Amino acid sequence: MSYRICVVPGDGTGPEVVAEAMKVVTAAGARHGFDCQATYLDLGGERYLRTGETLTGADLEVMRGSDAILFGAVGHPDVKPGILEQEILLRLRRELDQYINLRPVKLHPGVHSPIADVKPEDVDMVVVRENTEGLYSGKGSFTAKDSPFEVAVQESVNTRFAVERCVRFAFDLASHRPDRHITLCGKTNVLTYAWDLWARVFDQVGSEYPDVTRAYAHVDAACLWMVEDPARFDVIVTDNMFGDIITDLGAAIQGGLGIAAGANMNPGGVSMFEPIGGTAPGFEGSGKINPLAAIGAAAMMLATLGEADAARRVEEAVAAVAGSLPSLRAGQMGMTTTEVGDRVADMVAG
Ligand code: IPM
Ligand code: MN
């Protein structure tokens, strides 16, 4: 098999971690009998400053013609915050209809979690974040801007179509996991329109999955329980904004952004895989950044491409290397970025 991979190293530490991820993908291909033809796109701050372009029709064409996209990070100190995020990352999620943001939260044995005494078997959940609408839909308005009477409205858009496909994806995922448990994470007590729709859809779709047990948690309580009792969670399904927030909390409890990977999924189209940590300003070029999150994202990419054995092998190598490092934090790994990538690649090859 041969796969067309669109690689977007991006800004900051993106290129360094993506290079290690591609190294591991190549090793996995050699071992499992597939190869990846990479097409690199230079999306990000440098190009924007040079040309004024963020994402062109030609870029999108390359992406649409790929089997998967591996994405580093975007964000540049000389570009006003928001432009690159909005016009590249968020736009891609919508243009390619990557309606699920899948973010596993797993504590590997030997990895330090800031929660004292937590055991690896207690932290094994997957957040299914709706990835196209909610508060991210860009709808809203200013009235009387810059006056003392100014009103800024930011609307959360929730369509039954998008809620239902997200919830269905989550139930399907839960039905294939050992615990077969799902929690809807919302705010039904205050956001009485959006979460009423979510709760109704959750119950309707849930009735088609009798062997998946259902729970509900308000988002604030979910934050408390993710720290105090993470074992109660298996699959969590939630909207775009809450999913953004609780997955940073999830990243913290699994050892930090150095290990947190995610997938922007279009199950019928082209999906995009990324470390969720961003550009890590201040660390670029230092060899201090942890590439395990990007390598973990590459493992999710291989799983989605149908290379299940290769994906499992990469995941196991990531877990083993993570557990062997003194810390997963940038600059505290006791090894350089390249050395960590080499160690994973060697395990995958060996
Ligand atoms: C994430 C990031 C993005 C988001 C930003 C960079 C727009 O925080 O992927 O979680 O809010 O979705
Ligand atoms: Mn985020």
Image: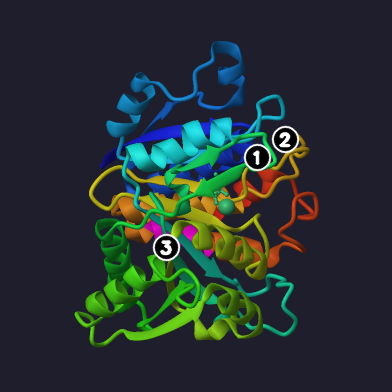
**Of the two numbered discs 1 and 3 in the rendering, the one whose residue sits closer to the viewer:** 1
Which of pointers 3 and 2 indicates the residue nearer the eye? Answer: 2
- If you read the primary sequence from the N terminus, does the residue marked by circle 2 or circle 1 appear first? 1
* 312 magenta-colored: yes
Q: Is mark 1 within 8 Å of ligand 1?
A: no
User: Label 2 sits on what residue type?
Assistant: Glu
- 3D distance between C-alphas at marks 2 and 1: 8 Å
Establish if 350 lies above or below 58: below
Inspect the image, locate mark 3, and give the three-letter code of the amino acid beneath it: Arg
The local secondary structure at tag 2 comes to: loop
Residue 19: image tag: none
Kindly state the secondary structure of the residue where label 3 is placed. helix
Farthest left residue?
A: 208
Disc 3 and disc 2: Cα gap in Å? 29 Å
Q: Which residues are magenta?
A: 310-316
Q: Marks 2 and 1: CB-CB under 8 Å?
A: yes
Q: Of the numbered discs in the image, which one, if any, rests on residue 284?
A: 2
Task: Tell me where residue 278 appears, x and y as whole percent.
Answer: 62, 44
**Residue projecting furthest to the top:** 51
Marks 1 and 3, how far apart in space? 27 Å
Q: Relative to residue 230, is residue 22 depicted above or below?
A: above
